[in-house]
Amino acid sequence: MKISVAGTGYVGLVAGVCFAEKGHDVTCVDVDENKINLMKSGVSPIYEQDLEKLMQKNYATGNLHYTTDYKSAYKDADIIFIGVGTPEQSDGSANLSYIAAVSRQIAETIEKDCLVVVKSTVPVGTNDKVEQFIKDFLIHDIRVEVASNPEFLAQGTAVHDTLHASRIIIGTESRWAEERLQEVYQNFQLPIVSVSRRSAEMIKYASNDFLALKISYMNDIANLCELVGADIEDVARGMSYDRRIGDQFLNAGIGYGGSCFPKDTKALKYLAEQHGYHLKTVEAAVEVNKGQKTRLFQKASERMITFHNLRIAVLGLTFKAGTDDLREAPSLDNVPLLLDAGAEIVAFDPVGMKNFQRYYPEGKSRNGRITYASGPKEALQGSHLCFIFTEWKEIKELKPDIFKQLMHTPLVYDGRNLYNPLEMKKAKVEYYSIGRK
C-alpha cells in the first residue's frame, strides 16, 4: 500500500520504517528540512536500537522516502498515519495543535478516497473531532474516514516492539476502514484487536496508566520496606510467581519518566475531571512518582551537612537505558537541586550528555558547576558522592571495588538497585538503594 506518515519522532519514524520493512511504499513527512536531509543521508535523528540500520536498508530499496512536501505525499496516499506530538499542557491536558495542523493539510490536499489513522496518543473522543475537522476542510468530493491505531512501543526497544508487538489495536467505525487497516498489518502476522475508535483511544491510556500504577505501587511498597526491615527485591520475587501479577514492572527505583507515562497519567486524570470524575488510583500514582524522583536526594541531604564544593558523580542522565530521551528523567529533578546546593557535578551518560548540555552547558551553573566525563570511572575519580539515575550497561558493569578505589569518599546513592548491598558493604562502600536492607 502507499502510505504517508506525518511526523518523524519516535512514533512516526519508527512506524514508517517498520511499514517499509514489511513491504509498503512509505513516505515520511516532516516540516524540518534539516531533519529530512539527515534521514536521507541514513542518519536517524533519534537514538533507537536497529532503527538506523532499517532506515538505510529500506531507503536503498526504494520502500522509504522522506520529504517536507506534504502535498505530494498526501494527495494520492492510500493511508495517512498521523504520528505528531501531543505535548502536555500546564493543566495536564494534551496539546492537539499539531494534530489539527496536519489534519487541515490532509483535508486540503488529498485527491482520492483515503483512510487517516491517528497513532498519536489523544484523549478519548479526539478522533471523532479529527474526522469532522477534515471533512469540514475537504476540497475534493472523496471518502475519508479516521481510525485510531495507538502505539505501545517502549523507547530503547521501539523497533522490536513494533515488529513483534503483543497485539495491534485498531479502532474504526466502518468495515471499509477496518479492512484497510487490517491490510496494512497483514504481513506483520500479529494478533489484531478490532474495536471502536473511542475504545482504542481508551485502551492506550488504560494500558500505560496501569503500568504506571504498578511502578508507583512497587515504589511505595519499597519505601515501606525500608521502614519495616523487609527487602523489596525479595518481595518482588515472591510476587512475580503469581500469574495474576506477573513479573514485569516490579522493579523499585526512583520513579517512571519518559514521553508516555507522566504525560498519559496526567492526561487521563484531566479527562476524568472534565467529566466530573476523580481517578483516585491514577492521582495516587502521579503523587507517589513525584516524590520518588528526589527520594535519593532527600536521603543524601539527611546524611550530609552540605553539598557545597563537594565533587558529585552523576551516572546516567536519560530516563532509562537504550534511549537519549531526557523527558521526565530523574536527573532533571536532582541535578538542579545539587547545583543549587553548590555541588561540583561530574556527569556521565553514554548517549544522553549532548541533550543534557542543552539544559546545563558545561561550566558554572546556578550556585555550583557541572562538567561531563568520557566514562563512569572518570566521573567517579575523586568524588565525594555518587548518584546513579540510569541503568546503563557501562554503569551496571562497575565492580564494587571501583567505587572504593576511585572515590574520595565511597558514598553511593543508587536509584536503580544495580548492586548487591552485601558486596558493596564488603568493598567498604557506604551504599544506599531503594527498598533494600
Image: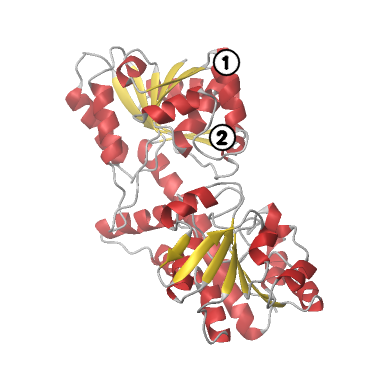
Q: Which residue matches tag 2?
A: 162
Q: What residue is shown at x 30% (from left), y 42% (from top)?
A: 125
Q: Which quarter of the figure is the C terminus placed in? A: bottom right
Q: Position of residue 218 (x, y in %)?
A: 58, 67
Q: Which residue matches tag 1?
A: 60
Question: Which of 240 and 308 lies nearest the eye of the viewer?
Answer: 308
| Foreground disc of the pair 2, 1 | 1
Regarding residue 242, the answer to whether it shows in the image is: no
Q: Position of residue 277 (x, y in %)?
A: 30, 62
Up-down: is 190 above or below 206? Answer: above
Up-down: is 54 above or below 2? Answer: below
Question: Which of 240 and 72 lies nearest the eye of the viewer?
Answer: 72
Question: Which of 367 and 41 lies nearest the eye of the viewer?
Answer: 367
Q: Which mark is residue 20?
A: none
Q: What residue is shown at x 44% (from left), y 67% (from top)?
A: 336
Q: In which image quadrant can residue 68 be found?
A: top left
What's the CA distance linking mark 2 and mark 1? Answer: 21 Å
